[in-house]
Image (spheres, coloured by chain):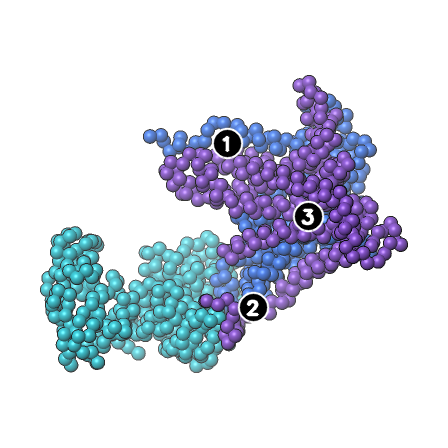
Chain colours: A cyan, B purple, C blue
Amino acid sequence: MAEVVLRNIKKSFGPVDIIKGVDIDINDKEFVVFVGPSGCGKSTLLRMIAGLESISDGELSIDGKRVNDLSPADRGIAMVFQTYALYPHMTVRDNMGFSLKLAKVPKAEIDRKVNEAARILKLDPLMDRKPKALSGGQRQRVAIGRAIVRNPKVFLFDEPLSNLDAALRVQMRIEIARMHSDFNATMIYVTHDQVEAMTMADKIVVLQGGVVEQVGSPLELYHHPANRFVAGFIGSPTMNFIDATVKAVAPEGVTVELPGGDNLTVLVVPGATKAGDKLTLGVRPEHLQEGSGDGKLTGTALVVERLGGATYAYVKLDNGTMITAEVDGNSHIRVNDPIQLGVRSQTCHLFGSDGLALAQSTRHPLADVGRGKGGH
Amino acid sequence: MTTLAPAPSAALPAKTNREVDTRPLLWPSVIVLFLWMIVPLAMTLYFSVIRYNLLNPALTGFAGLENYSFLFDDPTLWTSLWNTLVLVGSVLIITVVFGTLFAVLYNQEFPGRNIARLLVIAPFFVMPTVSALVWKNMMMHPVYGLIASLQSMVGLTPTDWFTDYPMFSVIVIVAWQWVPFAFLILLTAIQSLDSEQKEAARIDGAGPLAMFFYITLPHLSRAISVVIMIETIFLLTIFAEIYVTTSGGPGTATTNLAWLIYSVGLLQFDVGYASAGGIIAVILANVVAFFLVRTVSRNLQQG
Amino acid sequence: MSMPSTFQKPPRWIPVLAWVIAILIFFPIFWMALTSFKTETEAISTPPSLFFVPTMENYTDVIDRSNYARFVWNSIAVSFGSTLLALAFAIPAAYAMAFFPTKRTPSTLLWMLSTKMMPPVGVLIPMYLLFKTLGLLDTVTGLLIIYTLINLPIVVWMLYTYFKDVPGEILEAGRVDGANPMQELFLLLLPLAVPGIASTGLLSVILSWNEAFWSLNLTSSQGAPLTAFIASFSSPQGLFWAKLSAASLMAIAPILVVGWMSQRQLVSGLTFGAVK
């Protein structure tokens, strides 16, 4: 059992606060991804868990034990670094066995553990090479092997795939995901790539400016973003935001006026919203279609990108707002054509002037489902 | 961010488990350098205000600024300062001009470029006493020197370089040693010039001259200032070259500040007087050092 | 349109000029080398003899007669000894400043550098008297101490620059793996920094080997290195140019080769990292 619990964790460099009080509960065997734009504090937070950065305030416990003041080696963690940080002067075998050697583990025991890890990661033929003689993917594997050998309670990954090319990244993503189910270990993974976050995580923590914006399963963040930041950060291309004025409020939803005069009832809990309020309508590009829906938007296509399966149309609405629509790959739309886009009420989001989302009336059926498993 | 002084209430830098007591690592170096800096300097300062002559033990006592006033009244001081200035100035001009031109020249592609570069930088690795003797004997000797031979061959009277043009001769020797230094530094700097920048300039229509003045020279400006400052520090106290060639002469024609202090202190054994000269040398060097440290510290912040 | 290759080709006179200048600059060294294989008579013949039967006589003479071995040994002892000593002081200091920086680190570095700017003549007199009192005049030990002190700032500075270039993540990986600061230094950093330490050491050896202010002033015979020995040829008694050339060539050849091989690293050392 290795839960990781962060309670009101803070980090400041002099007067500058980098992490402004973070609470996160990470369950045993959970795969948690910290995601956010660069400078949001996600790497700092991971390094604080690792013990590479001190904790200014708050409490960090791993496996029920307060570890604030323990050295990295004593926290039961292992870390895979962005640059892999392999020891260039040591062979693969020595790299993987270094921590055990420092811990004065008997030679035979080291060999056994290292060989075991090598077998799992298919590193056997490379054991006597130096890191210089390895490809990027192989180095990545050795870095993972070095972590496995320590038999940690928690694996920490700091943007481990960012130095790999696109094809290898997909392959390693799958391997790390498989490793998670094989080892049944708690894993904390930092990335700025929301695709990695969506595909690998049981639970995503979205960070911005040293603050947790939202914690939830990938589909919960996708379907029920708590605020405009999360809505814009998760999903690609990014969500469209359109100014809208409230026309009417009813228990089952809020009716807003779209640019162009069409009315649309969005299925959200109205709360304190009243007619006349200025809200922001959020709709993902993939939820727009050519033609009509529950409401329509009209404009002109300025740029058309044909990807084959889908076509992205960058549309200037009649009121000047720019939006992106993912339309069918077989669409005949051309640049400068007028276009009409249909919006469906159940796929829309509404955000108040404070940026917070109005809660959806019904919960998406997959929102509480983890990666191919039941929820926790 | 608006105030530079730490706010009084601001918490101390967080105590990290990264905080290791580095004093045992750092202090040995700091202590020996501190002693090296302070002890001899304090002694020089002390000697410069007492009467102290090794040849005349009866002469003792506090002298106040006596040594300094003797020094300032001594025309040799002003000659030596002038000579120092001439030596440093001429060598700086020669090394920077030729160093820059050579850097541009040897940055071109031509057969055997690497060998040619090695030949040009070689004099810098020759110990000063060897350079000085080679020039004094084999090149500039009025009878047996190579230059004298060439002169007689074309019917000229051989020149007695160290008698007739002593300062010029010393400058030639020192410049021969330091042009390679300037060249080596500036060549390295010129190689870091972004080739795309050169290509862009070429597409913009820059010819070789425009390229040199608008692209290369501005790029080299910082390296040139570094060369000037480092050379100045070494050139202010040129000693070995004078020691083996002219011994400061004829008369005081090649007596620079370093030679003056040496001859007063270790040849005439007037410690007090020589120490006053030493203090002047320290002050001069510190003015230059100030600018060098400022340049380097700017570099440190960038890095 | 001209081809790109012709566009890039420099004018024809460039190689000629470059080679003429290179040969002229190198000529004194070449001439000295040539002279070292002449007899003393040939060495001072006018016009200079270009064609002669090379002789090794000068080399054997220098080596046999003038305690040459002692001067060579003194040079080796002071330059390598001072370099090792400077490294022993500088490695821990550079490690501390590169990996455990504090607010004072930049000013400490600059202060160390500024000690290098002290003109030697400024402290010549007290050092001479101090050495005299301590019995260090004309000793290898005395010179070794001075060279350690004058090279220490450069050595610290160069090592600091090299250590800074070692990726911090590697040392952090070591900490996660359980290495303490001393293990980080000896098991991780030093093996990684071997090239940097080597070129730092080379620069220190070159500077000490060629140092001629302190060696001329503080040594005369027993403790004298090659710089001081060569200077003794400047005395007007007799013209031993061929022997001088042989002794000089042996004195400069090793450093010339080392300097040629490590010129690039020397630049960053000589300019305190301001030019790389």
- The residue under the point 52% across, 47% down is B222
Q: Depth check: A194 or B173 in front?
A: B173
Please, is residue B43 above or below residue B170 in the view? below
Are discs 3 and 1 less than 8 Å apart at CB? Answer: no
Residue A100 visible in rendering: no
**Residue annotated with mark 1:** B111
- The residue under the point 78% across, 31% down is C239
Which quadrant of the view contains residue C153?
A: bottom right
| A35 displayed left or right of B34 | left
Task: List x then y, in percent, for residue B73.
Answer: 76, 46
Q: Around disc 3, counting alpha carbons within 10 Å, would you say few (fewer than 14), some (14 to 19), or many (20 or more)?
A: many
Which quadrant of the view contains residue A286?
A: bottom left
- The residue under the point 40% across, 32% down is C7
- Work out how far the residue at label 3 is from the one at label 1, CA to CA, in angstroms: 35 Å
**Residue annotated with mark 2:** C180
Q: Depth check: A21 or A354 in front?
A: A354
Q: Around disc 2, counting alpha carbons within 10 Å, would you say few (fewer than 14), some (14 to 19), or many (20 or more)?
A: some
- Work out how far the residue at label 2 is from the one at label 1, CA to CA, in angstroms: 53 Å
Are discs 3 and 2 less than 8 Å apart at CB? Answer: no
Q: Around disc 1, counting alpha carbons within 10 Å, would you say few (fewer than 14), some (14 to 19), or many (20 or more)?
A: few
